[in-house]
Amino acid sequence: MSTQPVVATRSYYLDNLKVALTVLVIGHHAMIPFVGGEGWPFHPSNTAESMPWMWHFLNTNAAFFMGLFFMISGYFVPKSFFCQGFSKFVGKKVLRLLVPFAIISIVLSAATGTAESGHTWFLSSLFMFCLVYALIRLACKKSCENSKTLSLGLVAVFAVVMGIGSYAIRQIYNQDDWIFWWVYKFEPVHYLQYIMMFAFGVMAGRGDWFNRMTNTVGRTSLIIGLLLSIGNYLRADGAWNHFVYQWFGVYESLLCVFLCVGLVWLFRTVGNWNGKFWQWSAAQAFGAYIVHLFVLLIVENLLDPLWLGVIGKYLTVLTLATVGSFVITWLLRLIPGVKKVL
């Protein structure tokens, strides 16, 4: 059988989902100072600018959104490798992932006085996953298309296996515990999720799962994912919170897998726009992710003396940082050669 992945046409809904995810990442980081800001380089000078209850927002985001980034990235890897071959594939990943990782790491390390890569840990991890895939394909040249269809049973089994592994890891590490190898860093409690979601994306790309997904699988996955997200928001100090906390490795994994599959279906169904604005936004999304940390810190410090109310301040920071990140990326990409990286 042919080794060529089934994916053939551009999936605008995945471009639009990446744009939405990028905005969510900016919104997530913009919220951190208002929730407590531990580990964040900016803290509001006005103590009234506090929304501690929004930890639910951060906790729910952390349960799935980077896993979804890895899944979407993995989806395009088989086709890219088939079209480019080993050397060109790895070379492009070095340029696209390791170059911005190195630049941001140098800037942050110089600014903080310690080895730091910030949010670009995603780039280094994605490069490692892509390299492992390329090496496996190089060693195993004969590979068949993934002819399986995506079923609810397959989604559930994948989520449960991830949950068992995540539960075991959480017996050793806590959330937000990071392991540093100089500028390379990773969070153990979520790393299994990232590896498995990338692998899920690769399998989906080889089998064209996202385009072939039935409405029943997509709709049911979305409903389950949303119900689990709502359940996480409803946590307080009672028995439900204790139950979710005790089994969070499993709970989070179920939320992640079902919600990610459901969101892909949702955007395929109602979010397959391809107008000029959305194409422009999709072209800037990767760069916006890279530069948004610096834009956020500038906006936060400039607006710090103003009193806009805590919700007004957050929404203003989010809006300005989002627009600024996308526009600055667009301007940077006008510089000759920068498009190859951003």
Image (cartoon, grey):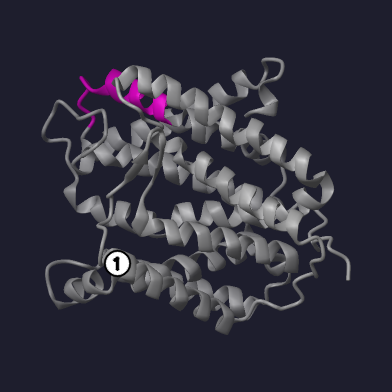
Residue 104 x, y percent position in the rendering = 47, 25
Does 332 appear above or below 90? above
The one nearer the camera, 65 or 303, is 65
Amino acid of disc 1: Asn
Find the magenta span and give its range.
293-308
Q: Quadrant of residue 286?
A: top right
Farthest bottom residue in view: 153
Q: Quadrant of residue 333?
A: top right
Farthest front residue in view: 139
Residue annotated with mark 1: 232
Please tell me whether mark 1 sits on a helix, a strand or a loop: helix
Residue 103 x, y percent position in the rendering = 51, 23
Residue 26 appears left or right of 113: right
Question: Quarter of the image containing the C terminus?
Answer: top right
Q: Main secondary structure of the magenta part?
A: helix
**Residue 324 visible (yes or no):** no
Does 39 appear above or below 138? above
Identify the residue at horizontal 62%, vertical 52% (top origin). Answer: 132
Does 221 appear above or below 174? below
Q: Quadrant of residue 262?
A: bottom right
**Residue 21 visible (yes or no):** yes
Residue 207 appears left or right of 216: right
The one nearer the camera, 201 or 53, is 201
